[in-house]
Amino acid sequence: MAKNYLATFGIIIASLAFIVFMLMRFSVDTSLNNWHKGFNGFVQASNVQQDNQKPMLVFFYTDWCENCEALRVNVLSSSDLGQCLENVIPVKINPEKGRLEAQIAKEFGIQGYPTLYLVSPTQKVLGLQELANISPEKFVQQCQTGLQSLS
């Protein structure tokens, strides 16, 4: 009888842990809601770029990548990025979500995650470096330096 209670208790705890995990992932994903997403988002961002001549900030990630999640949670969702994001058209692409997303990643030569590129309206591409454990302040600084070198 006690084993049944223990098993039931274990199932309840595991279920609650799963629910909390999924809610945390949902909150992370919604933090980048203002970003263009996937292949269609990339196409939309390219059209917007032609109209306003802003560079795109293209973020390649996967769902399983711990460094991608840390970058999303600690840096890309940070309020410190507000001014930086005003100067770019943000795009997020998970190459594992579809054939067209994978094709974009292939065209950019993506070999690891996370990877971020600044893409100028003239299609000049600049990769952002040293993304592991980067602070929002350092990321903004790197973005600003990259934007200056693209202009």
Image (cartoon, helix red, strand yellow):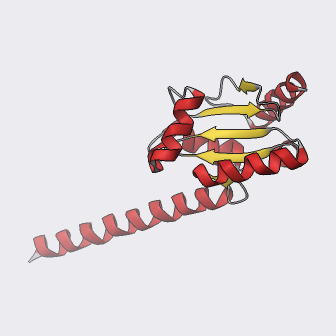
Q: Is residue 125 visible?
A: yes
Percent across and percent down for residue 35 are: 70, 53
Front-most of residues 126 and 2 = 126
Would you say 10 lies left or right of 141 here?
left
The answer to whether 114 is drawn above or below residue 1 in the figure is: above
Quadrant containing the N terminus in the rendered view: bottom left
Up-down relation of residue 12 to residue 39 (above or below): below
Q: Which quadrant holds the C terminus?
A: top right
Left or right: 150 as drawn, with respect to 59: right
The relative height of residue 71 versus residue 28 in the rendered view (above or below) is above
On the image, the x and y values in percent for residue 122 come to: 82, 30
Q: Report the residue at 80% width, 27% height from top.
A: 142
Residue found at x 58% / y 51%: 38
Residue 126, x across and y down, in percent: 74, 24
Q: Quadrant of residue 53?
A: top right
- Residue at left 34%, top 68%? 15
- Taking the view exactly as shown, the residue that stands out farthest to the left is 1
Which residue is depicted at the point 57% across and 34% down? 114
Residue nearest the observer in this picture, 52 or 34: 52
Left or right: 72 as drawn, with respect to 63? right
